[in-house]
Structure formats: structure tokens, C-alpha cells
Image (tube, rainbow, N blue to C red):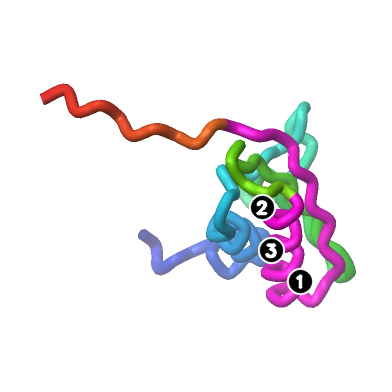
Amino acid sequence: MAGGEGMEEPADLIAAAVLDVPGVAGLHGGTFGEVGTYLPGRRVAGVRTDETSTDVHVTVYFDVAVADVAQRIRKVIGDLTGTKVDVTIADVVPVPTKELDSA
């Protein structure tokens, strides 16, 4: 790793914080990939942020209370950024099952 390069970007910090929220399966870039932050040479899907607001699009697991997950995201990201946070639950996916041991 090149000294944690890129992790200082607000979009990276937001993405990491969102992925740490229980029940979040992943970030979601939108139907046509329209939700994201463009950085030099890469893109952070599912996060748009500016000085006043943050837009987060996520996929959550089927067995969670969606409203609770959205509220946790709003709290964590609001505390991190100091901005208004809009959360979109873009998809719901099954909880992954552990792979069967084929040994």
C-alpha cells in the first residue's frame, strides 16, 4: 500500500464508515451508475458529497430493519461530515451463507 494514499478523501472516509454500519451489504452506484464521487483515476460508487449534504446509496441485507439501518447511516455520516445526510436503500439482498466445506 502506498502509505494509505487516497484514504484522506472525504468520499473514501464516508464509504468506509457506511460499510461498517451493521446491516449494510454494500454501496450502490445507482441503476445507471449515476451515484458516485469521481476522484483522479477512480470512482467511489454510492457516495456523493459537498459542503452542505451527503447522499449515500446502499444495499442492505434482507433480515435487517431497513429504517434502523438508514437511521444509523444518517447518524454516523452526519457526525463524520457535519452535513445533512440523505440515505437511499437501493436494493435488499439475502444474507450470504457460509460456503460448504468441500474437504
Q: Earlier in the sequence, mark 1 or mark 2?
A: 2
Quarter of the C terminus within the rendering: top left
- Residue 48 is left or right of residue 12, and the answer is right
- Residue 34 is left or right of residue 24, and the answer is right
Residue found at x 66% / y 52%: 39
Residue 82, given in percent of the width and then of the height, sits at 79, 77
Question: Which kind of residue does numbered mark 3 sit on?
Answer: Arg
Residue 36, given in percent of the width and then of the height, sits at 73, 45
Cα separation, mark 3 vs mark 2, equals 26 Å
Residue 95, given in percent of the width and then of the height, sits at 50, 36
Residue at numbered disc 2: 39
Question: Which kind of residue does numbered mark 1 sit on?
Answer: Gly
Question: Which kind of residue does numbered mark 2 sit on?
Answer: Leu
Cα separation, mark 1 vs mark 2, equals 22 Å
Residue 78's label in the rendered image is: 1
Q: In the depicted view, which residue is nearer to us: 103 or 18?
A: 103
> Which residues are the magenta region?
67-93
Where disc 1 sits, the SS reads: helix
Residue 24, given in percent of the width and then of the height, sits at 59, 49
Residue 72's label in the rendered image is: 3
Q: Earlier in the sequence, mark 3 or mark 2?
A: 2
Residue 35 highlighted magenta (yes or no): no
